[in-house]
Image: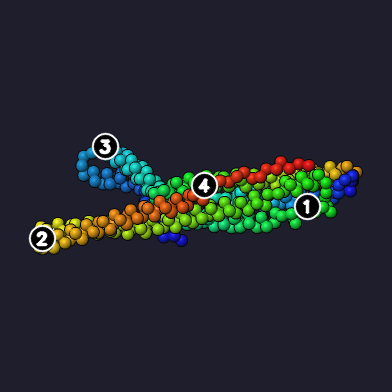
Amino acid sequence: MSYVDVLTAQMQARLDNADDALNMLEKYGPDVIRHLVNTNLATIMVPPWGKDKIADLLISKLMSGIKYARKAIVFQRTMVRAFGSPDALRAAAAVINSQVNKAAGDLALDVREENLDGMSPSSWSGDAQYKYSQAFDGQRDAVTRINEFGSALEDALRSMADTIEAYYVELTIVILGIVGAIVGFVLAILEAAGVVTIPVAVLTVIGACLSAAAALAALIAMIVTLSQNNANAIAPLEAELDPWPATAFSI
Amino acid sequence: MSDGYTVNPAALEHDALQFDDWSKELDAVQEAIPVTLSSLDFSVIPGAQDVYAAYQRAADALNAYVGEGSKEFDGFARALLKSAILYLEAEGTSADDVARLNQEMDDL
C-alpha cells in the first residue's frame, strides 16, 4: 500500500471520528443543554417557559454549529482525497495489464487463418471465400493494437502513481528546507539583537540565505521534474487510434 | 460442391462460432477498461489533471475501438452463418439442419 494512501486513510478515519462525534452531539446535545439550563437556572427566578426559550436558543446554536462542522468535514474529505491515490491508479493499471493487454495479446494469437476452417481452399473456394479472406486481412493487427494502446494507458497510470509519491517526498524536503531557512533568519535576528556578536549574525544570515536558495532551487527542480514526468505520461496517450478496420463483410 | 466453387457449410458454421467467441472476448476486454477513475485519484499536484484528462480521452477512445472490433467480429459471425444457411437451403439439406443454424443465428 502506498504511503500516500495510508496517510489518506488515516485522515479519513479521523474525519470519520469527527462525524461520529457530531452524531453523538446531535443526538444527546439537546437533552444535555436542557438539563444544564434547568440545573444552573434553578436558583434564579426564571419561569419554565423562559428556561425553555433559553434552551431552545442554545440548541438552535448547537445545531447550526453541527451543520457548519459537517460542511467543514465534507470539504476536508475532498481535500484529503485530492492527495491522490497511487493504490487506485496501480489497481486500475493491474486490471488493464491482465484483463485488457494480456487478454488482447492472447486473443491476437488466436485470431489467425489457421483457426478458421473456411480459410482452407478444401473447405471453401470461389469469390465468396476470396471476399472472406480479404475481409479478414488486418483483423489480427487490429486486435494487437489494443495491446499497444492499452500499454500506454497502463504506463500512464503507473507513472502517475510514482509521480504522486515522489511529489510528496520532494515537497517534504522542500518544506524542511524552507523551515530551516526561516529558523536561520530568526536566529540571525536574535544574534543581531546582541545575544552574540554582529559577525556571527552576518554569518548566520548568509547561511540562512543559502538555505533559502537551496530550498527555492529544490522547489524549481521539483516542478520541472513534475512537468517532464507529466508530459512524458501524456504523450503516448495522445497517439492516434485509427478506427477498427471495418469490412462490412457480407457474402 | 457446386459450379465453380467448393463449400463446406460446417466450416462456415465453425468459423461463425469462432468469431462469436472472439466477439465476446472483446466485450470482456471492453468492460475491463477502467473508464470511471476519479479525477481526485490523480491528485491535484501540478499537471495531474492534464494527465487525468488525457487518460480519460484515451480510455474512452480504446473503449470505443474495442466496441467496434466486437461488432466487426459479430458481423463476421452473422455473415458466415447466413451464408451457411443459404448454402444448405440451396443444396436442399434437411429443414432440421437449417433450423439449427437459424437458432444459432438467434443466439449470437
Check if mark 3 and mark 1 are on a common chain: yes
Q: Residue at x 32, y 43 (%)?
A: A65
Residue A133: mark in rendering:
none
Q: Which of B92 and A44 lies nearest the eye of the viewer? A: B92
User: First in sequence: mark 2 or mark 4?
Assistant: 2
CA gap between label 2 and label 3 equals 68 Å
Picture residue at 32% right of the left edge, 47% below the top: A32
**Circle 3: residue type:** Gly
- The one nearer the camera, B40 or A119, is A119
Tell me the number on the disc at residue A119.
1
Precedes in sequence: disc 1 or disc 4: 1
On the image, the x and y values in percent for residue A14 come to: 38, 54
Helix, strand or loop at mark 3: helix
Q: Quadrant of the C terminus of chain A?
A: top right
Total labels: the figure holds: 4
**B45 with respect to A34 (left or right):** right
Chain of the residue under label 1: A
Q: Nearer the viewer, residue B36 or B85?
A: B85
Colour scheme: rainbow
How much space separates mark 2 and mark 4, taking CA atoms? 60 Å
Q: Are marks 2 and 3 in contact (CB under 8 Å)?
A: no
Q: On the image, numbered disc 3 is attached to which residue?
A: A50
